[in-house]
């Protein structure tokens, strides 16, 4: 289910209309919109809370954005901008689908989002507490945002049990299937911090001396992924197998269209779609 609702939410990070909506309220530049939009449900928070909740960013990078973005746009303005941009992006991707399709998808996804257990899940909780959208696409986007942040909170909790620091998690993943050239600057870590993190990963048994992932690390990360899935499974158990299957059917064409805007190098980690030739897939290395 994550592979279907994540693309619905992710349009807010990549679609030109979403970027334009942030710029319209004074949030020019990608990272201003990102940090303000994603942190807005928390209120006018300072950098430490966001550094903790977002997990993988260098504290210095977060501090460059917060709290200064709140002098450009209030959290309320950022919330309106992210929803406006998300809806406009979804409208472009779903205009060929019948209204009844979108209404039913929004109803079911919103119901699932209303079933999340928010205990210990800060970003999931503040998104779940936002007012209900007036229109199907607004409800669809907000429900997807709630579910993805709820799942992300559980993933961070699972990662914390490994004893790894955020920079170590990112550096290790870049030795598995991601790119340091993209992720290091995108998360704000310096060369010195990155090199030191890789050495600690060797010392902790996560990387070999040749900087390859160890069997211990691979198994530990598999356990993290399983814990993440278990922590995110509650809404689907509550919704039931039959209705979850129906929601999957409804989301498939929407997610397929939304994925065309997500760059192949984006750190989201969505698996390749079988038999679907998206723009992102076309750009992926062979």
Image: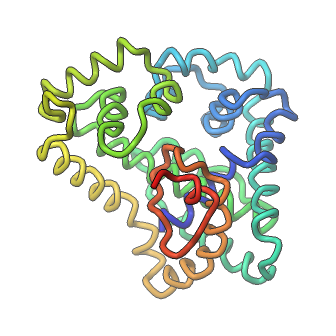
Q: Say above or below: 71 vs 150.
A: above
**In which quadrant of the rendered view does residue 39 lie?**
top right
- Horizontal and vertical percent for residue 262? 61, 52
- Horizontal and vertical percent for residue 235? 46, 68
Image-based side of 1 in relation to 134, left or right? left
Residue reaching furthest to the top: 192
What sort of colour scheme is used for the picture? Answer: rainbow
Residue reaching furthest to the right: 24
- Horizontal and vertical percent for residue 216? 12, 44
Which corner quadrant holds the C terminus?
bottom left
**In which quadrant of the rendered view does residue 225 lie?**
bottom left
Q: Nearer the viewer, residue 45 or 37?
A: 37
Q: Nearer the viewer, residue 161 or 60?
A: 60
Q: Residue at x 30, y 18 (%)?
A: 195
* Figure label count: 0
- Horizontal and vertical percent for residue 158? 29, 45
Q: Residue at x 66, y 44 (%)?
A: 13
Residue reaching furthest to the bottom: 242
**In which quadrant of the rendered view does residue 74 lie?**
top right
Image-based side of 25 in relation to 48, left or right? right
Q: Residue at x 50, y 14 (%)?
A: 60
Image-based side of 214 in relation to 5, left or right? left
Q: Say above or below: 5 vs 17.
A: below
Image-based side of 50 in relation to 167, left or right? right
């Amino acid at each position: 289910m994550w592979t279907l609702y994540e693309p619905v939410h992710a349009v807010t990070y990549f679609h030109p209309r979403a970027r334009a909506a942030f710029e319209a309220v004074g949030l020019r530049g990608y990272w201003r919109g990102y940090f303000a939009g994603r942190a807005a449900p928390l209120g006018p928070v300072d950098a430490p809370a966001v550094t903790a909740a977002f997990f993988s960013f260098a504290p210095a990078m977060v501090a460059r954005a917060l709290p200064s973005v709140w002098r450009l746009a209030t959290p309320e303005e950022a919330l309106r901008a992210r929803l406006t941009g998300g809806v406009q992006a979804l409208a472009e991707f779903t205009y060929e689908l019948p209204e009844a399709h979108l209404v039913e998808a929004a109803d079911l996804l919103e119901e699932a989002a209303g079933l999340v257990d928010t205990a210990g899940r800060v970003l999931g909780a503040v998104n779940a507490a936002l007012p209900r959208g007036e229109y199907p696409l607004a409800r669809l986007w907000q429900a997807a945002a709630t579910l993805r942040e709820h799942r992300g909170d559980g993933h961070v909790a699972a990662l914390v049990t490994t004893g790894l620091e955020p920079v170590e998690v990112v550096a290790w993943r870049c030795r598995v299937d991601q790119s340091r050239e993209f992720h290091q600057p995108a998360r704000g870590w310096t060369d010195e911090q990155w090199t030191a993190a890789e050495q600690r990963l060797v010392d902790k048994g996560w990387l070999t001396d040749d900087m390859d992932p160890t069997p211990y690390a691979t198994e530990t990360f598999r356990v993290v992924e399983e814990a993440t899935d278990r922590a995110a499974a509650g809404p689907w158990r509550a919704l039931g197998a039959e209705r979850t299957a129906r929601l999957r059917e409804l989301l498939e064409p929407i997610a397929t269209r939304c994925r065309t805007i997500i760059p192949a190098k984006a750190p989201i980690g969505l698996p390749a779609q079988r038999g679907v030739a998206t723009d992102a897939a076309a750009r992926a290395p062979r």
